[in-house]
Image (spheres, rainbow, N blue to C red):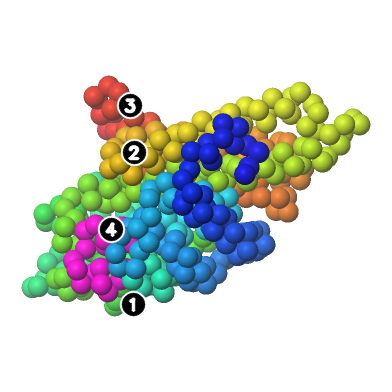
């Protein structure tokens, strides 16, 4: 029970959802919280070890069915993302990219052979996946991608480069999106294929407890069956992004909750001018406004989760959630930092780490501007993308 749940929204969760959440909260307390400040500072995270532990708990691809996946509800998956991101956005990203991007792409669009080969190992955390859509010169506009896949006899040959790819330096397999003569197609690319190299992107000031890389594809020869048979056009990778964005709607609430709880504890224990910071009206106004926004975000996430579980969730509804919840989580993190004063900039407290992480979360999986355009198009019927 968190003191910020003013509306008793936890009360609307099922027993099973609460139980799953409790398990994830415990694993974050045990495996992530004691170490994450150090990982963040070092810019390194033991992703393989974490993936195996998360795999044992069924957190990888947990909302998918079959092939060793847990088949949980969308709300349960969202709650897991919330608890993971209360630890760190980078740790939640590891799980999101694995489950909602790489595994979902194979589960939804792959052949039976792809599924048998990769999904059980990925669900167990024995194999790590990545998802390569963004390129150095093509981010918000993936339709203009330059990576090409051409036929050579029965084979496919891929050339190009993918940038800002989560998990790439540690991945066993990448789902790579490339332009072909028939349009955009997806390919399952084992990372040990000749011509594939992954370089770690260093000097990140955000999401430092997450491995991010550039994938270079230099004459990468793949058999005909490397292509995801059911993925035709850009709508395929976009559908994967809709899956992952739903997790982010929830995850951002976790980072914000951790900031709020930290600020609440700090404000009630630190004294200035002879009284706790919590006793100043200005501090209470900040805390009240933040808690109100957090509860609105939780309501929004629950509504989207229930729509997803009813099979009725539309992409622009996910845009509403991603736009609002990440934007508000970032505002909450920054405001909480002010309550902690100088300690707010210290790595001894999680607040600045969350705020820095949320800068990446605001940008990836569609920037806030792109989600505004999605919502704007829905409202007006006019596309303002170009
Ligand atoms: C830590 C991290 C991890 C990532 N992981 C992955 C991953 O695993 N896989 C993957 O494929 N990608 C990944 N990304 C990439 C991410 O999805 C892109 O950064 C994002 O889509 C934005 O693209 P861009 O950075 O090229 O920015 P740009 O597209 O160049 O945009 C720059 C600015 O211009 C604005 N802009 C662009 N077009 C418009 C428009 N039409 N109207 C108004 N404003 C506009 C944007 O909103 C933004 O503010 C990751 C990024 C980060 C930071």
Q: Which is in the foreground here, disc 2 or disc 4?
A: 2
At 56% from the left edge and 54% from the top edge, which residue is drawn? Answer: 22
Q: Which of 5 and 359 is in front in this view?
A: 5
At 41% from the left edge and 74% from the top edge, which residue is drawn? Answer: 126
Q: Which is in the foreground here, disc 1 or disc 2?
A: 2
Task: Give the number of the disc on residue 105.
Answer: 4
Q: Name the residue under label 1.
A: 192
Task: Give the number of the disc on residue 376.
Answer: 3
At 38% from the left edge and 48% from the top edge, which residue is drawn? Answer: 74
Q: Do the residues labelled 2 and 3 touch (CB within 8 Å)?
A: no
Magenta stretch, main secondary structure, is: helix
Q: Mark 2 points at which residue?
A: 307
**Quadrant location, the N terminus:** top right
Q: Which of marks 2 and 4 is nearer the N terminus?
A: 4
Residue 51 at x, y percent in the picture: 47, 68
Question: As displayed, is residue 53 above or below residue 360?
Answer: below
Separation (CA) of disc 3 from disc 4: 28 Å
Residue 265 placement, left or right of 272:
left
Q: Is there any visible trace of residue 341 in the rendered image?
A: no
Residue 382 placement, left or right of 42:
left
Q: Earlier in the sequence, mark 1 or mark 2?
A: 1
Q: Which is in the foreground here, disc 3 or disc 1?
A: 3
Residue 329 at x, y percent in the picture: 55, 38
Tell me where the magenta segment starts and ends, as one range: 103-119
Q: Which of 109 and 368 is in front in this view?
A: 109
Q: Which is in the foreground here, disc 4 or disc 1?
A: 4
């Amino acid at each position: 029970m968190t003191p910020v749940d003013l509306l008793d929204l936890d009360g609307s969760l099922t027993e099973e959802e609460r139980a799953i959440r409790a398990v994830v909260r415990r694993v974050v307390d045990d495996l992530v919280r004691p170490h994450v400040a150090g990982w963040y500072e070092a810019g390194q995270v033991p992703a393989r070890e974490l993936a195996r532990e998360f795999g044992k708990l069924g957190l990888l691809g947990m909302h998918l069915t079959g092939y060793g996946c847990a088949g949980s509800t969308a709300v349960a998956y969202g709650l897991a993302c919330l608890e993971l991101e209360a630890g760190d956005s980078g740790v939640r990203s590891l799980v999101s990219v694995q489950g909602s991007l790489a595994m979902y792409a194979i589960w939804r669009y792959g052949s039976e052979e792809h599924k048998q080969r990769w999904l059980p190992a990925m669900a167990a955390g024995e194999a790590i996946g990545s998802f390569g859509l963004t390129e150095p010169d093509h981010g918000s506009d993936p339709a203009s991608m330059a990576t090409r896949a051409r036929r050579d006899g029965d084979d496919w040959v891929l050339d190009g480069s993918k940038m800002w790819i989560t998990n790439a330096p540690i991945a066993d397999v990448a789902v790579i999106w490339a332009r072909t003569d028939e349009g955009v197609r997806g390919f399952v690319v084992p990372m040990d294929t000749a011509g594939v190299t992954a370089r770690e992107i260093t000097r990140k000031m955000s999401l430092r407890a997450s491995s991010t890389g550039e994938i270079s594809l230099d004459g990468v020869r793949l058999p005909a069956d490397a292509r995801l048979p059911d993925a035709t056009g850009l709508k395929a990778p976009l559908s994967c992004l809709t899956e992952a964005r739903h997790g982010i709607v929830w995850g951002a609430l976790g980072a914000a909750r951790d900031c709020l709880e930290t600020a609440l504890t700090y404000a009630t224990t630190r004294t200035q001018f002879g009284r706790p910071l919590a006793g100043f009206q200005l501090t209470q106004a900040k805390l009240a406004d933040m808690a109100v926004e957090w509860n609105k975000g939780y309501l929004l996430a629950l509504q989207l989760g229930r729509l997803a579980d009813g099979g009725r969730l539309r992409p622009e509804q996910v845009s509403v959630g991603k736009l609002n919840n990440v934007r508000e989580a970032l505002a909450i993190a920054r405001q909480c930092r002010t309550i902690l004063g100088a300690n707010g900039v210290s790595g001894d407290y999680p607040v600045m780490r969350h705020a820095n992480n949320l800068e990446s979360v605001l940008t990836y999986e569609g920037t806030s501007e792109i989600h505004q355009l999605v919502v704007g198009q829905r409202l007006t019927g006019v596309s303002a993308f170009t």
